[in-house]
Image (cartoon, rainbow, N blue to C red):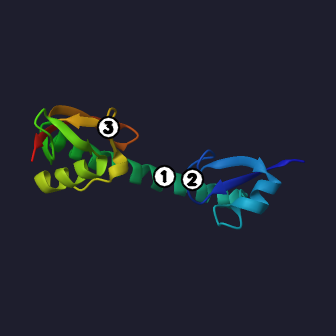
Amino acid sequence: MSDLKVILRSDVSGLGKRGDIVEVSKGYVRNFLEPRGLAFLATDGAVEQAGAMRRSRDVKDAKDRESAEEIAKKLVSKKIEVVAKAGDTGRLFGSVTEAELVVAILDQTGISLDRKDIVIEEHIKEVGSHQATARLHADVQFPIMIEVVAG
């Protein structure tokens, strides 16, 4: 059974990005890619179209990277204050989540992020200074300083 060359119409996890020319089995094309409108056969004219798709993807990617870098410049220098309920010893009732951090960033800076863009390595369960990582783009990730205060 031979493979077919197809051009991806949109990003497919584990296979490629929009405009990529990939070689996959006939069954995968027939049963998965074509019914969902994710790919089409790579004919000579379509290969030129794929080049245009890749160029537009590259332009969009560059714009996304630039906007992520702008956000990084604004947030790196700031310390985000998160108010959480805590006991007398400074131990929190629960922990600070990515969603709470996103709300605090929006309130204090006006920058709207998605909670999926924020990574808190260790659960924040105490009052004090902590750090999280923001991953806004494949090439742009930066630390966010967090100050947790009892409230």
Residue 51 placement (x, y as % from top left): 57, 53
**Residue 61 shown left or right of residue 82 in the figure:** right
Q: Evaluate whether residue 143 shows in this view.
A: no
Q: Secondary structure at mark 2?
A: helix
Residue 63 placement (x, y as % from top left): 33, 51
Quarter of the image for residue 142 reads top left
- Residue 128 bears which disc, if any? none
Q: Which residue is mark 2?
A: 51
Q: Evaluate whether residue 16 shows in this view.
A: yes
Residue 141 placement (x, y as % from top left): 32, 37
How crowded is the residue under tag 3: few (<14 C-alpha within 10 Å), some, or many (20+)?
Answer: some
Q: Which residue is mark 1?
A: 55
In the rendered image, the vertical position of residue 21 relative to residue 78, given as above or below: below
How crowded is the residue under tag 2: few (<14 C-alpha within 10 Å), some, or many (20+)?
Answer: some
Using the numbered discs, state the Cα–Cα distance from disc 1 to disc 2 in whole angstroms.
6 Å
> For the residue marked with disc 3, what is the amino acid?
Ile
Q: Secondary structure at mark 1?
A: helix
Q: Secondary structure at mark 3?
A: loop
